[in-house]
Amino acid sequence: MIYKIILFLFISISILPCYAVQKGSVEYNGVFVDYSKINYSELLKSADSHFSKFETDNDLNLLTTSMGEYYILAKVKPNEIYPVVQLARTYDITNRNRKAKEYFSKGLNIDKNNPLVNYYFGDFYYKRAEYKKALKYFTKSYANGYDKYYDLNLKIATIYEKFADLERAKYYYNRAFALNPSAYVLKDKVLELESLGYDKSEYYKKK
């Protein structure tokens, strides 16, 4: 019950000035609600369920609910990366860019090499066509355990193709195809790059 009260306060916090967040509690009109008593595992299950349903139904009410739940979870266990990353993702989806970057950065402060936070921080920049920044975080994610993720290999390949680094683009397209052999379009993409003869060009001879 208490988490529902805090969730209501969180949703209202950006609207009404009578709310304020304090360490370990949320204040409403001078009354503090302690969130340290929250059942973390139950709330996490609820947050993930709402977020998953949003991804299927695209219902923003579900996203708002999951946002509030992840916010509470991040307060209950401030050193847990997962709820921080998920909260950042909800801000990303709603184009609250400053808040998204704030929480992605918090995740990196907990563990700068964590592949989850690096992947989604990279994806944040990827969706906004800031490919140099995206590649920085994607590369860190790749190096720390996500090298077998199809989507990550595909996005890195796409970035290198945009940068005209076709040799590296081919490498990651091949990696993506190996992870998802049903994606025949990637095999065609590799053949297309090979047909350009880029590996025989002066640019690649000098590299």
Image (cartoon, rainbow, N blue to C red):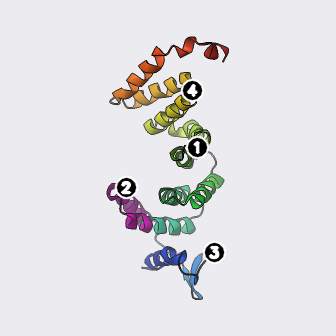
Q: Amino acid at mark 3?
A: Lys
**Badge 4 element:** loop
**Badge 2 element:** helix
Q: Which residue is mark 4?
A: 164
- Percent across and percent down for residue 70 are 49, 64
- Percent across and percent down for residue 206 are 67, 15
Q: Earlier in the sequence, mark 3 or mark 1?
A: 3
* Mark 4 touches mark 3? (CB < 8 Å): no
**Is 58 part of what is drawn in magenta?**
yes
Camera-nearest residue between 166 and 85: 166
Marks 3 and 1, Cα distance to the nearest angstrom? Answer: 35 Å
Camera-nearest residue between 114 and 96: 96
Marks 4 and 3, Cα distance to the nearest angstrom? Answer: 49 Å
Q: Amino acid at mark 2?
A: Glu
**Badge 3 element:** loop
Does residue 122 appear to the left or right of 55 in the view shown? right
Marks 4 and 1, Cα distance to the nearest angstrom? Answer: 16 Å
Q: Is residue 2 above or below residue 93?
A: below
Q: Which mark is residue 130?
A: 1
From the viewer's perspective, is the residue at label 4 or at label 3 nearer? 4
Span shown in magenta? 40-65
Q: Which residue is mark 3?
A: 23
